[in-house]
Structures are given as structure tokens and as C-alpha cells.
Amino acid sequence: MIEQGSRHGSVSRRTLVRGLAATGALAGIGMPFVARAAEPIRIGFPTPVTGPFGAEAKDQIRSAELAVKQFNETGGLNGRMAELLVRDDKLNPGEAATRTLELIEKDKAHFIVGALSSAVQLSVNEITRSRKVLYVSISQSDTINEAKDFSRYTFHEALNPHMTTAAVAKHTFKKGTRVAYLAADYAYGHEMLRGFKRAAAAIGAETAGEILHPFGAPDYSTFMPRLRSMRPDILCICNFGRDQANSIKQANDFGLKKAARIVVPVLLHNQRLAGGADAFEGVVGASNYYWRLEETVPSAKAFNDAFRAAYANAIPTDYGAYGYTAVRSLLMAVKAAGDTDTDKVIAALEGLTYDVAKGPERYRACDHQAIQSVLITESRKKSEMQGEADLFRILDVEAGSEAALRTCDELGHRA
Amino acid sequence: MNPVPQAPILEVEALGRRFGAFTALEDVSAVFGKERITAIIGPNGAGKSTLFNLLSGALAPTAGRLRFGGRDMTRVPQARFAHLGIARSYQITNVFPRLTAHENLRTAMQARASRYDFWSRRDALSGLAERADALLADIGLAGRRDRPAASLAHGEQRALEIGIALASDPKLLLLDEPTAGMGPEETKEMVALLRRLGETRTILLVEHKMKMILGLSERILVLHHGRLIADGSPAEIQADREVRRVYLGQSGGYGHA
Amino acid sequence: MQTLDQTVVDAPPGAVKPQRAPRVTAGFSRWRAPLSILALLTLPFLLPSQALAVNVLIYGLYAVGYNLLYGYTGLLSFGHAAFFGTGAYVTGIAIGAYGLHPLLAMGLGTVAASALALTVGAVSIRSRGIYFAMVTLALAQLVYYAALQASSWTGGENGLRGFTVSRIGLGPVSLDILDPQVKYLFVLAFVGAALALISRILASPFGAAIEAIRENETRARACGFDVERSKLLAFVLSGLFCGLSGALSAIHLSIVPLDSLAYHTSGMAVVMTLVGGAGTFFGPFVGALVVLVLEDVFSLWTPHWQLALGTVFILFVLFLPRGLWGSALERLSFRRGQS
Amino acid sequence: MTSAFAALDLELIAMQLFSGVALGAVFVMLALGLSIIFGMLGIVNFAHGNFFMVGAYAGVFVMERTGSFWAALLVGPLMVGALGLLVERFLIRPLAGRSPDDPLLLTFGLGYVLVEGVRILFGSDGLPFATPEELSGVADLGIGYFPIYRLFVVGVVALVLVVLWYGLERTRLGLIVRAGARDPEILRVLGIDIQRLWLWVFGLGIALAALGGVLAAPMRSVNPEMGNVVLGEAFAVTVIGGMGSLMGSVVAGLLVGIVVSMTALVAPEMASIAMFAFMALVLLIRPQGLFGKPGLGV
């Protein structure tokens, strides 16, 4: 995959040189606009190819490239082709900032799409907003919606903890349910905890207790006696990635799943694979995409089919789908704007409604958050799985609505 | 020329050192300064090294007192010993291996002159380089000025070893087996050097080569099992029955222990 | 004393640190800082991007600062990320939360890093050798977790943001820091000044004192050097320059990631210094250049670039312990010795 | 925090103490190999955590082929131990006579290679490792429930300690090893092949790290980065206990387990800091660690 990325990278350099040479030659005969029309639309794509989320990154790249390919096959922007400049951010915000600077300063990228962790996303955003470059972020976070980090160049295609927790709570909490929380002690963990508790308060569920655990902790045994003593009906585990796999597994070992239902804000395809069917059995969470959505949503079917055709019958995963929806919607806006001019594309994105993989989506004006559907999924029992990729059961699809977001006011955006 | 100081330079009072339950040195008292060269002898494990370490400040005593030039040194940190005028050499060559011979001496001299100067150029410190050259000539290493110490021959390293001790221009020089590992020729040259040095300062040395000690030193101290068992002129020591018993019982005569 | 006996004895135990410092003549040491700065002026033309060139400057200074302790004083620390990160965080917080002038903020960051170095140094120099490495590592971990916890100050895992410096006013002049060329020269000005200062310190009597301690601690103490105090001073100086490099990185990236305090960042200082040549003035800079460029190039070819990095590093430890620059200097002085 | 204190009762505290001891057993396991290699060879193995991780993967590898956890528990560490022998022979031994920093630096580089090697062979995602059937489930301890598998781990660690103690104190080989740790010269005088001894001690240390990895696999997710946290934990434990002291590793491991567990009860988010703060405290009072010899590098 990365080989493709690098080929794109070097192609871009060569085409840039060729393009410049052509500009010079043609300027001589007074036809500069022809050369300009041939200039590719460059989309910088920082993603953590190395590191623990390598598999998710690979999916993102494949999906994003699929979107680029489809754009180019349908003629591009009046003949201008798009290209994806993939860069490895190594899941390190400093590295990501350097790569983004390179993409903007050296590669002259028109747009930036990508990032897979909240920290990396915020660092890319910091670079792009000061350089006035449009950035479509595809990593989950509440922070990026808030006025402090937001800029008019910032778009957020991914879900955020507020949306996912509200959807999960709506489906699992009842009035009087006793809920215990185990949350990672960092921004993302706090955001998920806040979201759940807010939803719980609205529904009338009770808080049995909460424990903040150190971010990146490998062992959760010391929290289990207290969690058990809270006697919850539901255990909300608010963390991500490896922390999620470890804590669910250990909660299971301590027999907590027999006493309580385990609920998470986000149920990830690859974490479920790493954690195993037994540990995750019956765990409920939210997701932006699951391939079996194709049974009810036509655009999902079209996306899956295109993906299967391009990548040897593979299916797209949740984080992979973000690569597709983000790049696809961006290129739709470029087409609508008829130009790569940042201001024009911003205006086009703000006015766009797109349905490319999961039903209709649009960006809210005040914080550029994509209003979209949220899937509630449950991890399947091993014996009930129909094939390797049949990991989840879709319990419900919460349709996209602005009511699911925090108000512009609350986020600090002045109307 | 320079007369040997008549006032006692070093006073040792009931000095002792324990390591846990083990007593390495006990109740040693002596006054030094009258004689130019004093030798300390004794079988292996007699406490010679411990005594040297106490006298040079490398170890703090667990009992007794130490006075140098009338000043109490019992609790003074080691670095101060060099500043006040006590220097030592080591039995195993202990130089700065990757510095040149000249730098070895200049650095050692600098320890007394300047330690926390971040700004001057070290080679421009007043007169140090010249003094190091002079000392280099003194110990016969002028021709090896810019060779790294590690690449010098054994005898040359021994000379440099003593040169470093001399660099601080000490009033009291503690030499730990200065001729260790040397052949007869080298030993002879070292003895001549020590005689010369003894003219201007007090020297205390630990040695095993009895013949050399008898010819060189004016006074001999004998340690055994951490205690001082004899203290006197070479003739007195040779006649001492206790000393004979210790040495004869050990290896059948004076010699290498 | 010059006899025919030429038996070369082994270097004394405890002084066997053969990988450092081929010797450079005093005349050259006067010119090393200006020459280095000249060399660094060419970097933006040689490297694929300005951003990478600025990173080389920053990490080069970081490694040079680290080398002050490892290469010249002989203390192997595995916790220098604490100083790099502190320099960066304090700079960022001073600008973002208190609106300080960027230069003042950088000064504050550097001072804070030095103060932390004084504390960490005071605890860790009581242990020696390998133990020292572990103690510094563990204390740096403590700083890392503290920064993670103090998220209202540091932004926690999300990193510190919101202090982008776009212009720096210097009296009548205002520098556009968003312009990559201006930024490069701005950072180079600091790095160049730091290099000149470090060169001067290394050539000073204090430089001689720490070298003596590196070469033979026992003897240095017997000669009258206060070993503990000198080590602590070297530690603080090293922390100061690493802190400055951190402050520069905050200005450069306009974020401070939590990773800047992580074990990995400490390790980078060690890797770069060793690859370039510990105990040589410019070696660590060469190391930073090589490591960062390799990382840049390898990561375009393969996601498994760390395999190459690790292997290259192992080969250096095994076969080229003096590092690239150190070996080159050695070859040079050998040839000079021949002629 | 008030609600946390309100919830405290004796049973919970007792349970928390027990969790701490059980977690401490894991820490002891992590520190043992590191400590043995340092005590004998004077080498700080910076790849220790990565060998732990490789051990877990070796366990997965054997488990997938044989389907038996017991085979994985036995064969996994042996495989990784053999890898350790190769590392000692071809990477560590050539550094003999050089600065003691060099093996440390080498193993630091080796860590990168091991992580990337595993990523290439097994992918960068984690792998599942189910708790063995016969050890799954929870036991009622009277004060609360505890996973049977974790009790089993405590038992294995105790067994390993007994075997190590017997080997060191009661056998001729142990005598040689102990003498060698005090003064390698003695062994040379006695005509013992010290290189071969070091080879096997290094292999043993690595095998212990790997055994820790296999034991941890059913508790934690198996992934290429799982060794990174472990390295920090193992360092903290050995520094607290005193480098090279087996007794120190055991006592410090249990102490750290209890400290972490008790912190988890009153201020759970501080559990990671607690370990390093405890270490800083010990260092301030006793720089050589609880059981460290003051002469040894301190």
C-alpha cells in the first residue's frame, strides 16, 4: 500500500516539475491556462502506516484511493486528475506536523485529509489552520468541534464521542439502570465519560461509580474488585484501541460480564479481531460503518462492491470507510466548486449533502461536523458468526440529526 | 637547597577503619615531616592500601584523627586534599588514557588552578602549558609529549603516573608501589627520581622491594594485621624481632610478598 | 625513564571507554563552530524539505546537548526527553496561556529545562554506570506521567496546542515564521549561537575537567576535581541545550506532543549521538541528519523502517563504535599522522 | 473521591491487597530475567520487554500448531531462550572488553528489530489468546472472586522462584554462578569456562522474560508493543529492589504490586505514576535500592 503512496509521492514531484516546465514553455506561446488545467488536485493524506494502527491505516489508504480512482474515472475536474499523497505520520503528532508542513510547503497539497488519533488530528489541524489549508479530519474527537481548536478550514467527517455515547446509551440504558464507568484518564476518555453521563442523566439511569484508569495501562486487575463492588447492571468501558481490548478481556476474566452488560462507545473491527470473539461476545458499542449495512443501505452496497472489485474481495472496515467518505465528499465539493480554490471549496462543502456509503450526510455550518448516522452493533458469539468477517450484529441505526450534536452555543461558536 | 621542613607536616592519631565487621586498620599513630622519604611495608592485607586511602582522603576514617599542616583533615572531602597539598599515585597505572602525556599533566595542574571556568581557553591558562612541559622534562617524557597516555610503554606510564601526582606541587607525596612491574634498569631510574623529589618534599611510599627501600628511605613503618608493629630507621627495623618473625613466617625472608 | 621496554599494558579498568573522542587539534577547535554553521546553511538545499531541515537543526542541537553529558562527561542518560519536552512545553504554555513574547517564552523554557536537569541530576548522579542510565530513564518516565496527568496545563495526551507563532517582532523587524526559509534561518541563529557556546565550553578548563572525569573518575578526584559538582554542572548544561532545542521545536511545529517526553525521544538522542560519533563536536549533528533522513526515506519505502533503523544501530555498536563522524575524523588524523 | 472512600470496606481492602500481591507476582516474573542477566553479566538488557513480547508471540505460535496451552508454556520460552543464546553468542560476546554501556546500547537497537520482526511475521494488529479451558473461570476466595488463571500465574511464579533458589543455593552449578557473580576471576582460576556460563545465564534470563510473556498472553492482548510498558515496569522493580539482587526483585515486585493496587483503590488514575514515584522515593533514601550492594555501580 505504502508503495503506492510513495509512487504517488514521486509522481507528484515529477508531474510538478513537468507541469512547471510545461507552464514555462506554454507561457511563451501565451496559453498558460492549458498547463494549469493539467495540474493534478493534490490531497495530502497523513496516516499511521507504522505502529499499532497500521491495519486501520492500510484500510484508510485503500478506501481513499478508491475514492480518488472513481473521481478520476469519471473525468476528474474537467480533466484535472486527483492524486493522493500518502505520508506516514507514525501515530506521532510531531511527525504528523512535520509531514503536514512538507505536504503544504513542498508538495503544494491543495487539501489535507486524514489522521487516526485525536492528538495527531489536532496537531495536523494546528498546522493547516495557520496556513489556511482545508483539512478534513477523520479521527474521533469532541475537542476538534470546540471553538478553541476549530477554524473555518477544519472539517470533521468522523463521528465524535458525544454522538456515539448518546446513541449507545439510548439503546442500552433504561430508567433506574445502575451504570459503572471505567474510563481512560485522558481527553478522549473524559469525553466519552461525559457523553455517557449526560445521556444517563437524560434517561434517568443511575451512576453506580466511576474509575479513571491510567492511559495505556496493560493491567486492570486492581480496578476489578471495586467495579464488582459497585454491583452495576451495565459496565461502560470508555477507552480505545489496546486499552479497550485489554480491559474488556480482563473484565471478562473477573467474571464481570456474567453480572453486568459491557458497553463501549466505539466497537472497532480490528480490536475485535485482536481481542477475540469470546472476550467481546455480547459487547455493545457504536460504529460509523459496518459492511453488512449493505443489506439496508444502497450506497453501502455500492461502496462494498467497488471495494471488493478493487481489492480482491476484501471488505472495508469502519476506519477505512472514513477514508472513503472524507475524500469522496471533498472531491464532490471540488467538482461543485469547479476549482481547487480553498474558499470556494469550503463554501461548496458547507452546502453539500452527500450519500456515498452510509446514507445522507452533511456538514453543520458552525463547527463543520458531519451530521451522519450512527450504527449500534453487538459483537457476535463465535458459534453464530457466518464467516470470518461477520463480527457484529447491527442492533439499530440511529439516523443522522443535528439533535445528536452538542449545540453550536455550547461549543463556543458565536452564531 | 630547599630545606626539609622541620615542623611535622602530617600527624596521625589513633587512626582506624572498619568495613562492617572487618577491621582493616586499627590504632595507627605517627608523625611525619622530619624524614624526607618514609616507607610503609607489611605483608599483603596488612592495611597499607587502607592507610594510603585514609591519608589521601579516598576513605574517611572510622576512628582517630588526621592533621595536615596543623589542620584537621578527618572530615575533609578528597578533592580538597589535593588543593591543600597532598597528592598520591596508584599501584596500578591510573592515568587519563586517551589524553596525551602533556594533557595528562596540564589537566592535573588545572585541578588546582581552575575548575569551573566555562569561558577561557584551557590552553591559554596562565603558564599551565609551560609548567606541564617542564614537568614532562623532569620525569623524562619530553619526547612523548603528544602521545596518548594509553600508547606509552609501561615504564613511561609509571613515570606519568608520578608526574600527575606531582602536578599539584604537593608538600606531601604518597606513592603506592612506584616501581611495580618494573625491571631493574627502570627501577634504578625511578629511585634516582625519588631521591631528587625527596629533596623538596616529604614522600611516603608503599613498597615491596626491600633492597630498594633499605637504600632509599630514612624511616620505615611496618604494618601487620592492620596494626603498626614497628616504626624506626632501616637499621632498627632490620633488627626488630617482631618484624623478622612476621616476615620470616611469611615467605622465609625479605622479598616480594 | 625511556627504556627499551615497550610492553604496552592494558588500559586500566574503569577507563575502558574506547568508542569516544578521536583527538582534534586545538587549532581546529577554534573553527569548528563557524564551520558547522556554514555546513548547516547548505542543508535546506540538500534535503527534500525545509520542514525536515529544521528538524535536523533541532534534533542536531538536542543530540549535541546530549553529547555534552554522554560523549564528554561519560554519563549515559536515558532520560533526556524530560529536558527536551520541558523546554517545549514551558515555551508553548508561556506563549499560549500567558501571551509572552516568543523569545522570552523560549528563554523561560530553557531555564525550566535547566532547573529540572538540576533536580534530576542531583538525584541521579549519586548512582553510577549502568545504574545511572536506569535512574534517569525512570525519572523521565515520572515526568512523562506527570505531564499526562496535568492535562489542564499540557493538553495531556492530545498535546499542547493553540500557541502558533506566525510573526516574531524583534524591535523594528517582524519575522514571518510561517515562511519556511525565515523559520530555518531563525532556528539556525539559535542553533548556531548554541554551537558556538558549546564549542567554547568544551575548549574551556571546565571542558578539560569533565573530560578528565570521563577518562578516569578516580584519578580526577584524586587530582582535586570535585567530581560530583562537575558532573552536576555538566548535567545542567546538557539539560539547558536540550531544553533550548525543545523550545525551538515548539516554535517550529506549533504544537508540543506528549511524545516529546517519551522514552522514544530519549532513545533518539542516544541513537543519533552514537551513529554520528559520541565525544566529537559535530558528530551528533551528523547522526541527527543521517537518522532523520533515513527515517524519511525508509518510511516512504516500507512501513517496517524501524527494522532498518534498529539493524543499522546494532551494526554501528558492533563495528563502528566511533560513529560516522568520529571514524572519519580518526581516519583524517591518522593520515595526517602518517605524512 | 469521597464516594470512593465511602465504598471502602474491609472485604474490599483485603481483596485489593490480594490483587496487589497477585499483580506483584507478575512484576516479579518481569524483573527476574532482567535481574539475573545483570547480576551475572553486568548487562542491562534494554530489549527485555521485547523478549517478553516475543515470548507471548512464541506462545501463540506453538498454541496455534499444537492447540495446547501447556505446550506453549513449555516450548515458547525454550524457543525464545534459544534465540537468546544466539544473541549472546553473536551480538553480546563480540563486545567483551568494551565499555559496559555497549551491550546496553546494542540491546536497545535489538528492541526495534524484535518489534518490527514480529510486525512483519504476525502483523501489526494484536492477536487473540484465549485463557486455557481448564484454567478459565473465577474462584470464590471468601473475600471476593478472582480469576483462576491469575491464581495459576501466582503458582507458576512461586514454582519458578523455588526452582531458581534450589538451583542457585543447592547445586554445584549454582555455586559456580554465585561465585562468578562476585568475582569472575575466581572462575578463571578454577578453570571454568566463563563464556559458556555467561551464554547459558543469558539464555536463562531471556527464557524467563519469554515465560513471563506466555503467562501474560491470556491476561493481556498480544501485540508488538506490549513489551514497551513492561520494560519500564521491570526497570522500576529492579531499581527499587537493587540491581542484580534476586531477593530484591522478589520483594520489590510484591511491594510495587501492593503500592499500585492500593493507589488504584484511592486514586486509580495515579496507578502508573505511583510506581515511579515510589521508585524515586526509594532512590532518594537508598540509591542502591533495597537489596543492592552499595559497591555495585553505586
Image (cartoon, rainbow, N blue to C red):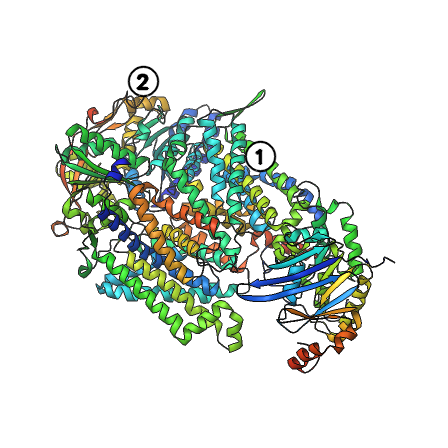
Q: Is residue D288 above or below residue C58?
A: below
Task: Classify residue C203 as left or right of residue A353.
Answer: right
Tell me which chain the residue with mark 1 is part of: C
Give the SS element for disc 1.
Answer: helix
Three-letter amino acid code of the residue under disc 1:
Phe
Q: Nearer the viewer, residue D66 or C138?
A: C138
Tell me which chain the residue with mark 2 is part of: A
- The quadrant where residue C5 appears: bottom right
Task: Classify residue B152 as left or right of residue D291.
Answer: right
- Can residue A39 be spotted in the picture? no
Q: Residue furthest bottom?
A: B252
Residue beneath disc 2: A414
**x and y percentages locating residue A17 in the rendered image:** 46, 35
Q: Residue furthest right?
A: B1
Alpha-carbon span between mark 2 and mark 1: 41 Å
As drawn, the label of residue C190 is 1
- Can residue C99 be spotted in the picture? yes
Q: Residue at x 34, y 65 (%)?
A: D161
Q: Residue at x 29, y 21 (%)?
A: A366
Q: Residue at x 68, y 44 (%)?
A: C204
Task: Classify residue D278 as left or right of residue A320.
Answer: right
Marks 2, 1 in one chain: no
**x and y percentages locating residue D164 in the rendered image:** 36, 68
**x and y percentages locating residue C27 in the rendered image:** 71, 46
- The quadrant where residue A407 appears: top left
Q: Nearer the viewer, residue D81 or A76?
A: D81
**x and y percentages locating residue C265 in the rendered image:** 46, 45
